[in-house]
Image: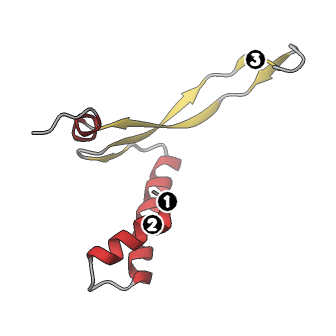
Amino acid sequence: MIRSELIQKIADENPHLQQRHAERIVNTIFEEIIAAMARGERVELRGFGAFSVKRREARTGRNPRTGEQVEVEEKHVPFFKTGKLLHDRLNGHTE
């Protein structure tokens, strides 16, 4: 599912909302998740999962083409851990 399909699904299931309002809701949610993660905060959506930022140490890597060693800077990467409800649903466990 892509963002536009999510917006359409929300608009279809909530006839009192206009499409542009559903789009604003989806964009606001994504923007807030991104802003919180940029501040280094963890975002938890109960039953769905948690978004966080992990720090990767600087290291010496290798250029795959030449085999030459290169220095890779420290970086921060997004991380998502599924919640129990999502994990169970993906694995066919229903209650």
Q: Is residue 35 above or below residue 95?
A: below
Q: In this view, does 79 lie above or below 19?
A: above
Quadrant of the frame with the C terminus? top left
Q: Residue 80, position in %: x, y?
A: 42, 38
Amino acid type of the residue that numbered disc 1 sits on in the rendered structure: Ile
Amino acid type of the residue that numbered disc 2 sits on in the rendered structure: Glu
Q: In this view, does 9 lie above or below 45?
A: below
Colour setting = secondary structure
Q: How far apart are marks 1 and 2 (CA)?
A: 5 Å
Q: Distance between the residues labelled 3 and 1?
A: 34 Å
56 sits left or right of 63 in the view: left
Quadrant of the frame with the N terminus? bottom left
Q: Residue at x 86, y 13 (%)?
A: 67
Residue beneath disc 1: 2
Label ID, residue 5:
2
Element assignment for label 3? strand
